[in-house]
């Protein structure tokens, strides 16, 4: 057995010379093992996780209501996301880079379902419902309903316009100086107020009524 006393006739643990650098040294900091770094994962709605592929952008998925699927197998989702509301086309679990097109009659159904699920604040839901309930003006027939805004130094509009039979497209248009208006073929993410403005203008101009009748 090792002696508890050192060559200086002290307890080894109390000797500042013999205990230096050993586990008995009170000034020695305990080293803690660092946990292995975990890979970044992306959480999907199914509850499963997977590491994103190289170069793949992270897609934020929030609570939503949907319309469809339509003939091409896609569905249109009205989602609550950070910063506002997103209206987008989804195929399976993939967010498509195109402006959403859906049946005009599905707009009212989506807003009603959003009310049932408390998807948005009561104020935003009230604004959307009032917009869809707007009666067409007798002396006004518009090609589309629009909510004007700005994109940096350029003008932009959120438009609701008829496309095909019974369908409408909800998309952002950017005005390029010298080139005119151009559709941004991508999902739309804006505050609920902008959607309500565009829907109100489309209803007042008879766009929604004509699309629904077609």
Image (cartoon, helix red, strand yellow):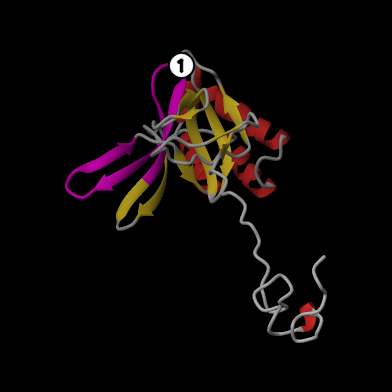
> What percent of the width, then of the height, locates residue 120?
65, 44
Q: Secondary structure at mark 1?
A: loop
Q: Magenta-highlighted stretch: main secondary structure?
A: strand
Specify whether 9 is left or right of 127. right
Q: Residues within 10 Å of mark 1 (few under 14, many from 20)?
A: few
**Which is nearer the eye, 107 or 209?**
107
Q: For residue 1, which quarter of the picture?
A: bottom right
Q: Nearer the viewer, residue 98 or 1?
A: 1
Q: Quadrant of residue 144?
A: top left
Q: Estimate the x, y position of residue 28 in percent, counting from the top left.
A: 67, 75
Q: Quadrant of residue 41?
A: top right
Indicate whether residue 206 is drawn in magenta: no
Name the residue at 77% across, 78% down: 12
Image location (x, y in percent) of residue 151: 35, 53
Outermost left residue: 178
| Image location of residue 196, percent across then percent down | 53, 43
View extreme (top): residue: 71
Residue in the image at 62% along x and 46% along y:
124
Q: Is residue 174 above or below residue 153?
A: above
Residue 81 visible in the shown view: yes
Magenta stretch in the rendered image: 157-184
Residue at 35% from the left image edge and 48% from the top image edge: 156
For the image, the number of numbered tags is: 1
Q: Nearer the viewer, residue 157 or 71?
A: 71
- The residue identified by callout 1 is 214
Residue 203 visible somewhere in the drawing = no
């Amino acid at each position: 057995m090792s002696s508890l006393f050192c060559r200086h006739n002290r307890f080894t643990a109390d000797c500042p010379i013999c205990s230096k650098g050993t586990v008995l040294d009170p000034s020695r900091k305990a080293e803690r093992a660092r946990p292995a770094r975990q890979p970044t994962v992306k959480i999907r709605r199914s509850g499963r996780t997977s590491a994103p592929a190289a170069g793949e952008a992270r897609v934020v998925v929030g609570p939503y209501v949907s319309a469809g699927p339509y003939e091409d197998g896609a569905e249109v989702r009205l989602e609550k996301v950070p910063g506002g509301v997103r209206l987008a086309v989804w195929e399976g679990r993939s967010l498509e880079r195109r402006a959403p097109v859906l049946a005009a009659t599905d707009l009212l159904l989506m807003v009603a379902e959003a009310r049932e699920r408390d998807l948005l604040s009561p104020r935003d839901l009230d604004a959307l419902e009032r917009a869809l309930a707007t009666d067409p003006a007798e002396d006004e027939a518009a090609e589309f309903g629009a909510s004007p805004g700005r994109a940096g130094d350029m003008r932009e509009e959120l438009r609701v316009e008829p496309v095909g039979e019974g369908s409408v497209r909800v998309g952002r248009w950017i005005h390029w100086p010298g080139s005119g208006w151009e559709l941004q073929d991508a999902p739309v993410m804006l505050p609920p107020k902008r959607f309500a403005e565009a829907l109100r203008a489309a209803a007042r101009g008879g766009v929604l009524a004509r699309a629904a009748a077609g």
